[in-house]
Amino acid sequence: ELKVEQNPLFLSMQEGKNYTIYCNYSTTSDRLYWYRQDPGKSLESLFVLLSNGAVKQEGRLMASLDTKARLSTLHITAAVHDLSATYFCAVDIGDSGAGSYQLTFGKGTKLSVIP
Amino acid sequence: NAGVTQTPKFQVLKTGQSMTLQCAQDMNHEYMSWYRQDPGMGLRLIHYSVGAGITDQGEVPNGYNVSRSTTEDFPLRLLSAAPSQTSVYFCASSGWVAGWEQYFGPGTRLTVT
């Protein structure tokens, strides 16, 4: 059974600071997703990481994937209040090259950026 | 494109009632799935489909039925609602043309009393 663990689950940070959210998973996978969710809303796709060593950046967010360590990170640079949301990582249990589209989610990291 | 649509947005049921949550997509995606989201639990996969006529169980399938008669539609049926099924339900779709992205619908908030 695939387990996905995110930490921290709650994060309060000041504007302008940097921080990293970690996503560990328990079995082999090379397809990892990061989503953002605002209260009462659906999930917004941030990144899809498809191979070992993949790194993607969008604005103040950067995600990376290390399949050997079974670890993905979401790094926040110079946080702003608009980044306040819950961030989820999700892992596809499918084998390499053939996605199963069955995602196992972490419990989410609730980020609050304080002015 | 409307993307992934879900109806209704909100629903209140009494224990034992049945209902169908509707999900449709207009992106010609092969893959569709249903997740439920509970506080502190993240999202959990209920059922999924890899194409019309093909469905399979996810992590938490008990109490739910699905069918996929067309590429576009993937309804989720609650057979006899229980308070434990109070949750927010999300439908998602993906496929080759989506470049591995999963697109989520707006969700249905269900309360069972």
Image: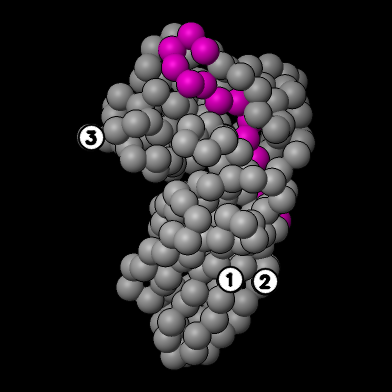
| Residue sitting at x 59%, y 45% | A29
Could you say whether the residue bearing mark 2 is in a helix, strand or loop? loop
Q: Is residue A68 above or below residue B97?
A: below
| Left or right of residue B63, residue B74 in this image | left
Q: Both on one chain, marks 1 and 3?
A: no
Query: Which labelled disc corresponds to residue B10?
Result: none
**In front of the other: label 2 or label 3?**
2
What is the quadrant of the C terminus of chain B in the image?
Answer: top right
Could you say whether the residue bearing mark 1 is in a helix, strand or loop? strand
Where residue B80 sits: x, y (%)? 72, 19
Where residue A112 sits: x, y (%)? 55, 77
| Residue sitting at x 57%, y 50% | A90
Residue A109, by quadrant, is bottom right
| Left or right of residue B51, residue B13 in this image | right
Amino acid type indicated by mark 1: Ile
Which residues make up the magenta segment?
B38-54
Q: Is residue A25 magenta?
A: no
Q: Main secondary structure of the magenta part?
A: strand
Kindly identify which chain the residue marked by label 3 belongs to: B
Residue B99, by quadrant, is top left
| Left or right of residue A93, residue A17 in this image | left
- Nearer-N-terminus badge (2/1): 2
| Residue sitting at x 51%, y 46% | A31
Q: Are marks 1 and 3 in contact (CB under 8 Å)?
A: no
- Which residue position holds label 3? B1
**Res. B96 in view:** yes
Query: Which labelled disc corresponds to residue A21?
Result: 1
Q: Are marks 2 and 1 in contact (CB under 8 Å)?
A: yes
Query: Which labelled disc corresponds to residue A8?
Result: 2
Amino acid type indicated by mark 3: Asn
